[in-house]
Every structure is written in structure tokens, then in C-alpha cells.
Image (cartoon, grey):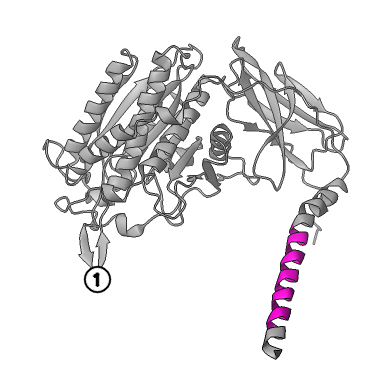
Amino acid sequence: MGNGSSGTCSFGLAVLARAVVVLLLMAIPALAQRAVSRDPAEPLQGKPLLPRPAGVVARQAVDEKSMRALIGKLVACGTRLTLSSWTDSKRGIGCGRDVIVARFNEIAKDSGGKLQVVVDKFESTSERTSGKPMPLENVYAILPGSDPQLAKTIFIVSGHFDSRPSNVMDPNADAPGADDDASGVAVSVECARLVSKAGANGRGTYRATILFAAVSGEEQGLLGSTHLLEWAKQQGYTVGGMLDDDIVGADSAAGAPHRVRLFSGNGEIDDADSPSRELARAVEEIDGRAAIRMIFRVDRYGRGGDHYPFYKAGLPAVRFTEPLEDYNHQHQTPRAENGIAYGDFEKYLNFTFMGDVARANAEALRQLALAPAPPKDAKLTGAVTPDAKVSWSAEDDPERAGFEILWRETSDPRWLVNDFAASPGETVLKGVSTDNHFFAVRAVGKNGARSIAVPTEMERRPPPLPAASKQ
């Protein structure tokens, strides 16, 4: 009887504890709101917002079968190490190039000739080429922009088609590279089909140019992407944004498909407003938080990818990567050791997840390429006054509806819209402190497409310091 009473008492205490926890959890939002309400009110303007562009890329439009087929053909090349053969049609990196060119040509034909396929040949050198110049090739499919003012702005999506075994200098070992990075190539190629098909179906042409890339030399030191950056400059393009898809094919954890991770670096700016960070925010806003998990790092810890040369050049560049990597299936020569299977094979991929990534990339590219040019010279003034003053400039654009003035708490990761202005110049935000928020401006097209945000530069006024004493 004594044990039964003790058990009943313990059960009752457990129920009571749970009830207390539930009540506390219910109270936290109210307490938080009360804490917020204790701050002085700062007026929101409440301007109406234009809806996002029509013609959204539908998830069911993604062709997972063609993505699977492309990856299967790339894996069948045996190895795609950059140091392997460029001339053997059956085995080596040249085999991989041929597979990609053939698929791009099929998509170009279906686009009504709008898509232009380019094989870009060059040489490069690194420690992983033994310090010798090596022949390399990138493959591009280019969808030219229709707007004379924006056609030289280019948005890039890229995956690398080279692979590697455990020894990055061994051109003879098998290196199937299904996830790293045939998956990223498949996403880039599928984006070409989705985006060019949308244009061909009459749902609007793209103001800016879009480039769908498959680059080589990533495993030898980001050689292909470094060259792609230089190639874009030589062609007279301004890079509006670069989406790197690398290791985006596997999602084996329970509950899949999960969100894809989106990495973006902070750059040299104190308040987390680098062009890359703004591109990440734009992608998340376009695709939604259910699809995108923003990671505020330039890349995975201690690692790097093809967006890095663009990021270091101060350009908007981000990396998509699967939610939880399995290192037994990356950078490993296929083998079995101690009951563990190593190797990067197609059987470990999740094509539902990969299709989600392709859709997210395609829709982000579509909206960014439909948008007006970002504003310039965004500035914040109004220090030691009751009002924040935001100013910016922009070239004339008959397709632009105006500008959204954005703000966010200094501790928050995402922008909110504060006001709308039809023209460039200065807008005074009455009763809004310059101290409590960060501010930015972005252009909005009549079609509802938004440019990436341009953060305001602030006046740098250090406090007066005493004069140096004379000895």
C-alpha cells in the first residue's frame, strides 16, 4: 500500500510539473510582448505592397527522372577527377563534360533556341595540379536577358562536375561523385530547363541574363569557378548573384525531406549586411522559411566551395548544401572497411529533396532576373534628430514601380518593410530613431519582382576625444 501511494504521489507531481511547464510556455509570448510594449512606439507607415510576380515555378514541374538519369550517366564515367582524361568518351572528366553538353543541347532545343550552350576551355594551376598548368573546361548554358539596361547583369547557378577519390591526385581510382557534386550539376541543369521553359511558354522574358553552369576543377582548388568569375568580367557582365549548389542530393535523416542549408558570409561589414548576406535573405524571402535554412557562415566549418571566389570579390554569392552530410559518402574511394561502406553512389541520394532544391533555385533565379536593378548610394542620416532620413539614387526605369524602405532590429536576421517611395531621393521616417534599427532599400518592379536589398551606409562620427597631452 505504501508503494502504491508513493507511485500515485509521483504521478501527480509529474502531471503538476507538466502543467506548470505548459503554463510557463504559454506565458512566455505574452511576457515577451509586454517587454516589447515597454519600448517607445516607433510608427509603421503601413504602405500597401505589390504581390510577388505571377507564374511561380511549380514543384510538380520539376523532372526528377531526368535529374536521376543525368546523375546516372555522370556516375557511369567512373571518375571525373580533373586530372583524368578529357578525351576518353567512356571514362574520365571528358566523359562527364560530354554528358552535360548533350543534356544542355536537348534543353536548348526545347527552349526554341533561346538557350545558348558554351564550352569554355582554359588552363589553370594549383598545388593539386602539381604546380603544372592543366587543361580545364567549364560548360555554360546562357539565357540572354531581354532588357537593354539589364542584359549585362548576370545571375549564375552552378554545380561542379569534377569528382575525387580519397587521394585527390589519383586519376585512376573510381570516384562516382553522385552527391559531390553530380547533384549540384543536376540542379543547375534542371534550373535551365525550368527557367527557359517558363520563358518559352510566354510567361514573360527575363530582364537580366541567367547562366547555368557546370564547372570543373573544384576539388583541385576552386579552379573552374575562379575562371568563371574572370570569364564573366571579360564578357562585360556584372554579377547580380551567384548560387552555388554543392552536395545537395542526400537527405537520409528521419523526417525527410528537410530544408536545404543556405550559407552566406558576412564580408567585412560589422552589421551582417554583405551583398552575399542580402542575396541569402532574398532567396529565403522568395522561397520561404519552410524551404530555406539560412546559415550565417560563408561555408561549412573549415571547408569551401565555388561561391567563395565571388564572395571574396565582394559579389553576392551563396552556397546550398544538404541538411546533414554523411562523410562516408564524400571524398571516398569506394570500398568496405570494418563493415562500413564508403563511396559516393546514387543509391544514397534523395531525389524528392533534390527536386525541392532545384525548385528553390529556379524560382529564386526567375524572380531575381525579373527584378529592376538595385538602388545605389543608399545612405542613412539624421543622427541627433528625432527622424531617420534614408536616401538613395537609381537610374530611370519605366518598368519599376518604386522602392521599398526596409528596416530590422539590430538583433534580427530579416528585413521588414517600413515604407514605400515611388522615386529615388530622400525619405524621412518620422519618429524613427537612427539608433535602434538597420535600414536598407530595394527596387520593386511593376511585375512585383524585388531586387536584393542595399543596406544604407551610416555617417561615421566618433565621439570627440581629448587632445594628446604634450610632454
Q: Secondary structure at mark 1?
A: loop
Is 370 on the left or on the right of 397, as rendered?
Answer: left
Q: Which residues are magenta?
A: 7-25
Which quarter of the picture shows residue 68?
A: top left
Query: Residue lying farthest top?
Result: 398
Is residue 413 in view? yes
**x, y (%) of residue 382?**
82, 33
Q: Amino acid at mark 1?
A: Asn
Foreground: 325 or 457? Answer: 325
Query: Residue lying farthest front?
Result: 1
Which residue: 31% across, 59% down?
328
Q: Is the residue 385 above or below the residue 171 in the image?
A: above
**x, y (%) of residue 431?**
87, 33
**x, y (%) of residue 341?**
25, 61
Query: Residue lying farthest bottom?
Result: 2
Foreground: 82 or 370? Answer: 370
Residue highlighted by disc 1: 338
**x, y (%) of residue 13?**
74, 75
Which residue: 39% across, 53% down?
252
Quarter of the image that includes the C terminus: bottom right
